[in-house]
């Protein structure tokens, strides 16, 4: 029973709705978060209760908050943004070679949206990086750090944490002449990703028992789990998250999961205002944030439905091309 509760916590953490109190429950919550969402303000355990809570409201309050932050996928209404500052910001993204680190290591959960947000930035800028997959059950890979969430990025021995802060710091080093914050529109949509988009995702990812199993199958197949942990997390976690997602749906006043997901996608497309990217002719940090958060769900049923029933598919395909192949190097 304790093990089942822990798994339930994991699922809740993934969704952002976990409420477990014990340390054991927290570990499972992290696992769940790992599978369906990333932490709030830019950090992620994929769904560690802390990371997700931070992303969601700086999740220190509960695993539930953390999970919700990770898997949000909602779209906020967009307003045209074609300021000169915004265009320059986007156009200059890949031009500077001022930042040439020798050793970049990302501690992550494979399915964590916020970890994927950092990876999208690294891939787009062709910054070579190594990956250390963290086991969400015991997090032994980051025992050395006082920061117990992911992503953690080590750059030539310097620790960086929180996905949005990591991206801001890297961008500033690459382009010291350009403000990482961008213009008002770019800041608004980056905030929307961390505080809104994530909330719509869990109810969609775990909408049905089959979708919950699909999600946990992906999470456990790509995560750093032992065989026993993989089996337990997949079936017990999927069952727990199915019920947790219903609570999250009510908590965030969502009546129709898919309708909320489609609305979010359409809102993002509207925010493009007919441009190829939010940044204009090239992606800006808002584009990279939305793409990174959505990448883990793209080939799950919820992501497939989203692309089939909204206009976001063309933008997403352009982003795949723009971001290009992974810059990951083997350790």
Image: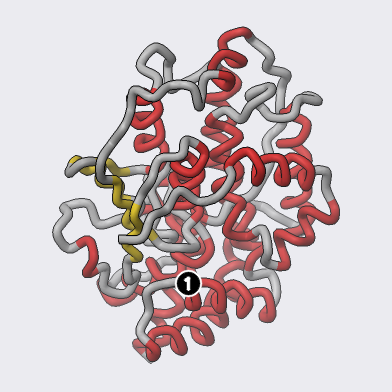
> What residue sits 50% from the left and 79% below the top?
237
Residue extending farthest to the right is 309
Q: Decide: is 100 above or below 3.
A: above
10 Å neighbourhood of mark 1: few (<14), some, or many (≥20)? Answer: some
Q: Is residue 17 above or below residue 54?
A: below
Please indicate whether residue 5 sits to the left or right of residue 155 in the image. right
Residue 40 lies, in percent from the top left, at 44, 47
Q: Is residue 183 visible?
A: yes
295, 92: nearer the viewer: 92
Residue linked to disc 1: 222
Q: Residue at x 54, y 76 (%)?
A: 216
Residue 100 rendering spot, x and y as whole percentages: 31, 32
Helix, strand or loop status at disc 1 = helix
Q: Quadrant of residue 287?
A: top right
Residue at position x 33%, y 28% from top? 99
Expressed as whole percent of the image width and height from the top left, the position of residue 93 reads 51, 25
Which picture quadrant has residue 271? top right
- Above or below for 37 versus 42: below
């Amino acid at each position: 029973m304790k093990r089942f509760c822990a798994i339930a916590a994991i699922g809740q953490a993934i969704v952002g709705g976990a409420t477990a109190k014990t340390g054991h429950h927290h570990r499972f919550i992290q696992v769940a978060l790992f599978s369906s969402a990333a932490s709030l303000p830019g950090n992620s355990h994929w769904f560690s209760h802390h990371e997700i809570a931070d992303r969601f409201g700086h999740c220190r309050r509960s695993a539930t908050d953390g999970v919700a932050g990770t898997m949000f996928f909602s779209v906020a209404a967009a307003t045209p943004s074609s300021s000169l500052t915004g265009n320059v910001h986007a156009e200059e993204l890949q031009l500077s070679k001022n930042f040439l680190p020798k050793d970049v290591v990302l501690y992550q959960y494979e399915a964590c949206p916020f970890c994927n947000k950092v990876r999208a930035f690294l891939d787009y800028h062709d910054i070579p990086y190594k990956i250390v997959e963290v086991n969400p059950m015991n997090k032994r890979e980051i025992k050395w750090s006082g920061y117990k969430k992911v992503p953690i990025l080590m750059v030539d021995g310097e620790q960086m944490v929180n996905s949005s802060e990591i991206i801001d710091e890297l961008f500033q080093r690459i382009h010291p002449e350009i403000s990482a914050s961008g213009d008002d529109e770019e800041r608004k949509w980056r905030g929307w990703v961390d505080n809104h988009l994530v909330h719509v995702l869990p109810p969609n990812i775990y909408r049905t028992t089959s979708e919950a199993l699909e999600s946990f199958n992906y999470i456990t197949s790509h995560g750093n789990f032992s065989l026993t942990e993989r089996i337990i997390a997949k079936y017990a976690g999927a069952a727990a998250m199915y019920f947790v997602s219903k609570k999250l749906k009510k908590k965030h006043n969502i009546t129709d999961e898919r309708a909320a997901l489609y609305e979010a996608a359409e809102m993002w497309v509207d925010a493009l205002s007919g441009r190829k990217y939010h940044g204009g002719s090239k992606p800006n940090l808002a584009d990279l944030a939305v793409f990174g958060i959505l990448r883990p769900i793209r080939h799950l049923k919820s992501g497939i439905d989203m692309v089939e029933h909204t206009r976001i598919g063309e933008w997403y395909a352009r982003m795949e091309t723009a971001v290009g192949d992974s810059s990951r190097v083997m350790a």
